[in-house]
Image (cartoon, helix red, strand yellow):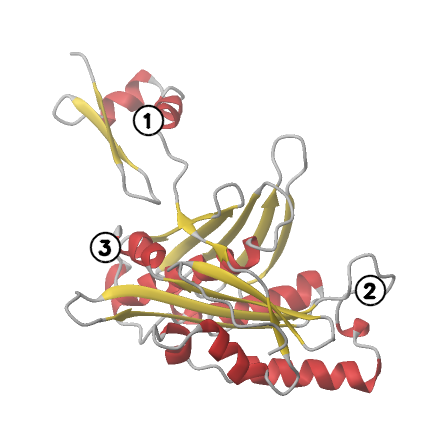
Amino acid sequence: MTQSKINIEMPDYVLPFQVGDQSIRGRLCRLTGVAERILSAHDFPDPLSMLVGEAATLVAMLGEALKFDGRFILQAQGEGPVSMIVADYASEGDSVRATAKMVEGGAEKVAAAKGPELHYLMGKGHLCMSVDRGPDFEIYQGITPLKGATLSEAAINYFAQSEQIPTMVRLAVGRLSLPDEKPQWRAGGLIVQFMPAEGGTRERGETALRGEEEREAWARAEAFAASVAADELLDPDLSSTDLLYRLFHEDGVRVFDPDPVHFACTCSREKIAAVLDRYSKEDLADMVEEGKISVSCDFCRENYEFPVKS
């Protein structure tokens, strides 16, 4: 490792790194409290909880690369028992949130899945990644078919088609039991990409792999990243720096300072009230139960109640 070992004390973080002297960059993510907060708020069957946790991990790794204040959004829509998954990362506050929707009657089919099988849970659909820099900028958006057995494969396909960036992604989510503690959700992820230097004149993508040396360097990095096991990404006793050294020590790996990740939701009573104001009196009347309208946030499940005068 070409940089002294970094002591990471935070429980939720994204760790940027560089492999060798080539333009190979990566990020390693580990979510403990954040994964537990996101997934325990929902009553999803375990396979869907795992898929939502993978989406939160992926969006944290991709959002960490933002060089400006804004929001990175990942959205997948499909025709299977899970109709939608949404996760986003806000650079202001380094916060992540994620949720999903099942079709009516879809919970039984979701529970029957062997794990976070994207092709089974969502079927045909599309994957959209967006960057929102605020009201003064246009939203950048890339859309590709939802292709692959896993969310990792779908993300690799997205970058190959939409961005033409050679990419390898590994994701893992599971419940871990520590001594004297109840099982808690934990998530981990690794992404490695060939990223030509900023300001360079050559194009991104496979055509940017100039010469046998670069092609071999990427092939090694891709293979090393693909070899990481789910247990390694989730193991609390295996440090991130030790894991990166295990994977990339042949070419050398430089580790940078970790960025913290937090859970935060943008919902508020004021925002919910503004949405309700758009409904007609007749529609609002249909929402009233026991003299009040109750609305729960899809992300954090916070419940807001609005008394209705008779």
User: Is 182 left or right of 224, judged from the image as shown?
Assistant: left
Residue visible at 62% across and 76% down in the picture: 253
Alpha-carbon distance for marks 2 and 1? Answer: 47 Å
Vertical placement of residue 96 versus 306, above or below: below
Q: Nearer the viewer, residue 46 or 89?
A: 89
Residue visible at 25% across and 67% down in the picture: 111
Image location (x, y in percent) of residue 232: 41, 79
Residue position marked by numbered label 2 in the rendering: 203
- Label 1: how many Cα within 10 Å (few below 14, some 14–19, many 20+): few
Image location (x, y in percent) of residue 35: 34, 58
| Residue type beneath disc 1 | Arg
Residue position marked by numbered label 3 in the rendering: 43
**Quadrant in the rendering for residue 222:** bottom right
- Label 2: how many Cα within 10 Å (few below 14, some 14–19, many 20+): few
Residue visible at 54% across and 81% down in the picture: 245
| Residue type beneath disc 2 | Glu
Which mark is in front, 3 or 1? 1
Quarter of the image where the N terminus is located: bottom right
